[in-house]
Amino acid sequence: MRRDETGGEPVAPVAVRRPTSREVHGETLTDDYAWLRADNWQQVLRDPAQLDPAIRAHLAAETAYAEAMLAGEAGLRRTLVAEMRGRIKEDDATVPAPDGPFAYFVRHRDGGQHPLVCRTARAGGAEQVLLDGDALAAGKAFFHLSGWRWSPDHRRLAFSADDTGSEFDTLRIRDLASGADLADTVPDTDGGAVWSADSTAIYYVRRDAHHRPSKVYRHRLGTDASADELVFEESDPGLFVGLTETQAQRLALITVGDHDTAAAMALDLSDPAARPRLLAPRRTGVRYSVEHHPDQGLFYILTNADGAEDFKVAVAPVATPSPDHWHDLVPHRPGTLILDIALFRRHLVRLEREDGLPRLIVRELETGIEHAVAFAEDAYSLGLDAGHEFDTTQVRFVYSSMTTPAETYDYDMASRARALRKRQEVPSGHDPAAYVTRRLHATAPDGERVPITLLYRATTPLDGTAPCLLYGYGAYGISMPAGFQTARLSLVDRGVVYAIAHVRGGTEKGWRWYREGKLAAKTNTFTDFIAAAAHLEAAGIAAKGRIVGHGGSAGGLLMGAVANMAPERFAGIIAEVPFVDVLATMLDDTLPLTPPEWPEWGNPIADPAAFATIRAYSPVDNVAEQAYPAILALSGLTDPRVTYWEPAKWVAKLRAATTSGKPILLRMNMDAGHAGAAGRFDRLEEIAWAYAFALKVAGR
């Protein structure tokens, strides 16, 4: 790390400019920093040591500069990590979930970074550790236990792991009696697996060279992966392939789709030579997902077909599942978004959201009688867990709010009895009454009311003096839940107001809220966030000039856009794995996510209007000479979703353009991908970096 002539202030790295130009739709695009993209980036995903030394040196210099500039916060970061770790029950475990003769659960040991997958006999008894994540991770710079699924006969376990952060998962099979792994090893999977009914084979999805999940294979135990049978292949690079299992475990479902369309094919898990059967063809703009009721001979279909923008539930005979045989069971109700369904032998459960609040609706299949499971707080999070069994009256859900730790309930759908099975423990102590959570609304430039969820200490003065961290995402229809997160308390306990802006691009206010934050309407996401910041200041909730924006991935795009559009609104910006080079990425159809992402952002290759729209907001392309706030970008070298060179290019352009003199920083994790560090305590280090930066720039 270089310092200036006086030996004091660290000197920021200066990225060499090597301009490259190209013509697109009659316009010239110039990129000074295209050299930061490694030609062999696909190999780097698998082996980070393959990175070009010049690029590695630049990224290392950026990280060293960030660490030097924030060296004064090292003590604060240690304190934050200690606080956050003190709120984690280190030997925690999930509530066991029954499946046949066993109940399966996940736990951590004291000091352990990774999960242990365990089971007991259903009636209780000695624990059997099926997988020890800490042991599997030993000696590895990165390790993520991505998924696991036991066989129907409960004798074997299929599990997958990622050793680099690239999300190329290796699938293995473990014999549960001996604890030994079989010779069967399948590379380059998406992490999931579905067992055949006789427990002799698994189905899985393999990623291609461009990281796209595109093929479904059948692997017969005891054979080499090179001999696996190709069951299905999707050749369209704009579509992703997925694989799920129905609740009754009779069928596997191969899904094919993008952000706008979907199709599903059924595989009979009892047929060793099963071929996929298309249930309904893809139609532009139509999405659907399927559950199967073998006793009734029906498919239950969650779909937006026939103008059901907020989705409806239809049924169709298994023998004739095409759309002309769909009949509405739960009609579409505009403004009530059906998020998910769970199907059991005697009940159907749906998770829906209305006016920003989730609830569960339980329907008795025989009578059609419905009842709701809801809660009284102004803002809360509700998760549905269908478990592993079909012939049951029990369903599990998890409730929390910004102030209330997570509570896991088993709910009897027949008797309507609710049993609390677990309440999240906070070892260092937590008094919900010491905190306040509120829901308020900002007015966007077009008149829309943008929800904002607040969390603050009851003693924090709301007189225009409190700093604020304002979080946002706004893409893909993903909503930001108002749930409990212990890490946030380290900000709130220091007098910071924690706020979530539920901007357009999510589905907090129904599917329309998503539609009005994508494609040509994408700028609504950005102006909603700016309006939220302005409202917090005007209402005296946050101090003017002391709001820190925070977002990751597509939320990092949001951060880059608002930094360009309204830099004066923010004391700082934290952008994690930020998708900031939108135009260049959407123009590159060799990148794994580009063709499937065109329905979200637009296709600037084929559509000049989409090109103009994206170019007008793409953060890297709109960096200008102006006074930017302090900015911290956090990223990972082996990220296949938002490639490392996006934040590297963005930071280089920002640093050359800013007139404020405030720091523009990039910290690159050379041993992780999109999700950052995989260990639960290692992840706290990264959160501490973000929070210490926020506290510093907000003057706390």
Image: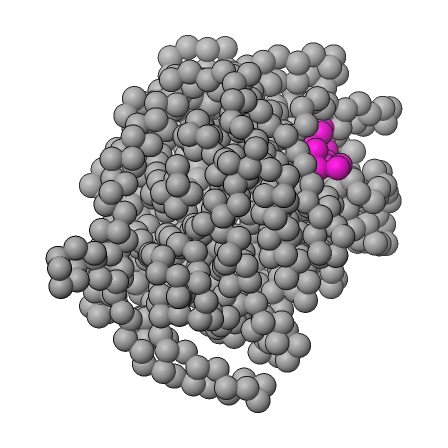
Q: Nearer the viewer, residue 537 or 655?
A: 537
The question of residue 125 being in magenta is answered with no
Q: Position of residue 522 (x, y in %)?
A: 64, 61
Q: Magenta segment, which residues?
A: 350-360
Question: Eyeballing the image, is 4 above or below 500?
Answer: below
Point 70% across, 33% down: residue: 357
Quarter that holds the C terminus: top left
Location of residue 19 by image quarter: bottom left
Q: Position of residue 163 (x, y in %)?
A: 31, 48
Judge left or right: residue 413 versus residue 617: right
Residue 37 appears in the figure: no
Q: How many marks?
A: 0
Judge left or right: residue 650 versus residue 446: left
Question: Eyeballing the image, is 196 above or below 241?
Answer: above
Q: How is the image coloured?
A: one colour
Point 29% across, 35% down: residue: 76
Q: Position of residue 566 (x, y in %)?
A: 54, 59
Point 74% across, 12% down: residue: 415
Q: Nearer the viewer, residue 263 or 285?
A: 285
Q: Nearer the viewer, residue 646 or 210?
A: 646
Q: Mostly what secondary structure, the magenta segment?
A: strand
Q: Nearer the viewer, residue 62 or 609?
A: 62
Quarter that holds the N terminus: bottom left
Judge left or right: residue 165 versus residue 475: left
Point 52% across, 41% down: residue: 543
Residue 413 appears in the figure: yes
